[in-house]
Image (tube, rainbow, N blue to C red):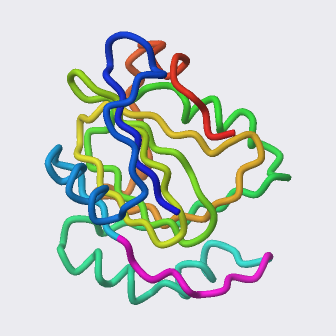
Amino acid sequence: MSLLVIHPAAGQPSATALRTEDSDQIQAELAARGIRFERWSAEVELPAEADQEAILAAYGAEIARVQATGNYPTVDAIRLAPDHPDRASLRQKFLAEHTHSEDEVRFFVEGRGLFVIHLEGEVLQVLCESGDFLRVPAGTKHWFDMGSAPHFTALRFFDNPAGWVAEFTGDPIASRYPLLD
C-alpha cells in the first residue's frame, strides 16, 4: 500500500507531521506541494525474463497516455531484482540528494520504492508501489531508495533523449532519514 510520511526538515527525522496510507489524502497533500500523485492500473503480469522492450510494449496504453501531453517524448523501463549485480552501487547513487533540470516522472508497474522529497521546511517520504504514478517537478531536491534487495519495475518518462541526468547537492540529509529496509 502507498504511504506518505511528512517530517519537519529541521530537528529529528523521527518526528512526523503526517502519516497516511489513504491515496486520496496522499494525492491532496502532494498536490498542495506541486507534486502529482495518482493511482493507475498496473495489472499486466510481466514474465521474469521481460526485457525493456517487452515492458514498454505491455504498458503501451499508459505510455501513450503520458506522452499525449507532449511533455515527455522519451520513455524507458528500469527493472531491478534482488540479484541485480549492480544493486548496491545503484542504491548508493540514488540515495544521494539530487535535482534534475526536468520533471522526474515515474509509473511503478511492479514492486516498490521510496521517493524522498526535500522541500523547504519538510521532508516527504512517499512509498510508491505498483500502480503509483508520481511526477516531481524539475529542480526539486530528492532521493530514492530501492532497498538492499530491490524489487521494482518502473516506467521513466523524460523530456530529453539523455534520460536520467542528476545534479547532486552534496547535502548529507538523506543519511538522517529511514531507509526502505
Of 31 and 78, which appears nearest the observer?
31
* Residue drawn where x is 32% and y is 19% of the image: 9
Q: Quadrant of residue 98?
A: top left
Tell me residue 166's x, y (percent).
Answer: 41, 34
18 is within the stretch colored magenta? no
Q: Look at the image and tell me in which quarter the C terminus lies.
A: top right
Please tell me which residue is depicted at 31% across the width and 32% down the height of the picture. Answer: 17
Locate residue 88 relative to residue 136 in the image: left or right.
right
Left or right of 88? Residue 158 is: left
Say which of 128 and 161 sits in front: 128
x%, y% of residue 15?
41, 22
Tell me if residue 63 comes above or below residue 115 in the rendering. below
Please tell me whether residue 155 is drawn above or below residue 85 in the rendered image.
Answer: below
Number of numbered discs visible in the structure rendering: 0
Looking at the magenta stretch, what is its main secondary structure? loop
- Which residue lies at the image location 45% right of the left edge and 52% below the top edge? 3
Instruction: Please indicate whether residue 43 sits to the left or right of residue 36 in the image.
Output: right
Q: Quadrant of residue 65?
A: bottom left
The residue that appears at 44% across and 47% down in the rendered structure is: 164
- Displayed quadrant of residue 50: bottom right
Q: Position of residue 76 (x, y in %)?
A: 49, 66
Q: Nearer the viewer, residue 169 or 19?
A: 19
- 42 drawn magenta: yes
> Residue 93, image x and y in percent?
58, 31
Q: Is residue 10 left or right of residue 129?
A: left
Q: Is residue 138 above or below residue 16?
A: below
Closer to the camera in the image, 69 or 13: 13
Magenta residues span: 39-48
